[in-house]
């Protein structure tokens, strides 16, 4: 199987420092800081990248499941909202909201919802995030 990597470098203290994260492919490099992660400020953060990974994986898993059943999607668009909260262990991803819209000829909304639920359970990133207490799904067929 494939091995994919990413890297991060942090310089300075937690609140005053700053860092950069980079995908191993070089397709993305972004600055991050305490403010971009725990407050509202410029830059990215690990949770945002987890959201992108989850949205991408889920979209592909849903397209694959639909295709295996003979329903070839025109478009699958997924947004993932990653909630960073607190727990006894410290900052914790407490919830991820997946919102998917699909254009899939030949199926109805109930079928789309069923396929989406299966993709949510089966996607590699969903399985990797099994420790997140609540992953919600809102699926809309257009």
Image (cartoon, grey):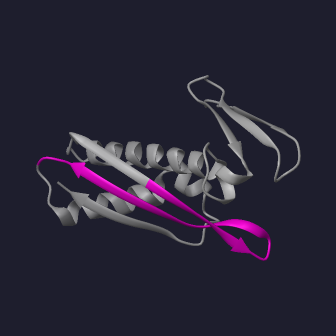
User: Could you say where residue 134 lies in the image, as x and y percent from the top left?
Assistant: 53, 71
Location of residue 135 in the rendering, given as x and y in whole percent from the top left corner? 50, 67
* Residue stretch in magenta: 80-105
Above or below — where is 126 with respect to 75? below
Please, is residue 18 above or below residue 118 in the view?
above
Q: In which image quadrant can residue 110 be found?
A: bottom left
| Residue placed furthest toward the top | 26
Q: Where is residue 94? Give x, y as percent.
A: 61, 69
Farthest bottom residue in view: 88
Nearest the eye: 137 or 20: 20
Looking at the image, which residue is at 64% across and 47% down? 45
Residue 132 placement (x, y as % from top left):
61, 66
State the image quarter where residue 119 is shown: bottom left
Tell me, yes or no, whether the highlighted magenta stretch contains residue 104: yes
Judging depth in this view, the residue of 63 and 38 nearest the camera is: 38
Q: How many marks?
A: 0
Q: Residue at x 28, y 63 (%)?
A: 113
Does residue 1 appear to the left or right of 122 in the view shown?
A: right
Residue beneath the point at 60% across and 58% down: 129
- Dominant SS of magenta comes to strand
Residue at the image position 39 percent from the left and 42 percent from the top: 60
The C terminus is located in which quarter?
A: bottom left
Residue 130: quarter of image: bottom right
Relative to 114, 142 lies left or right: left
């Amino acid at each position: 199987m494939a091995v994919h990597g990413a890297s991060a470098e942090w310089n300075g203290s937690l609140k005053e420092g700053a860092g950069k994260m980079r995908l191993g492919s070089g397709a993305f490099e972004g600055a991050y800081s305490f403010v971009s992660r725990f407050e509202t400020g410029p830059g990215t953060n690990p949770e945002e990248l987890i959201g992108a990974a989850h949205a991408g994986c889920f979209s592909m898993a849903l397209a694959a499941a639909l295709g295996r059943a003979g329903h070839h999607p025109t478009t699958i668009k997924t947004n993932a909202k990653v909630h960073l909260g607190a727990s006894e262990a410290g900052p914790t991803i407490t919830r991820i909201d997946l919102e998917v819209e699909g254009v899939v000829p030949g199926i109805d909304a109930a079928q789309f919802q069923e396929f989406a639920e299966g993709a949510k359970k089966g996607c590699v990133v969903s399985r990797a995030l099994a420790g997140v207490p609540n992953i919600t799904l809102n699926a809309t067929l257009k």
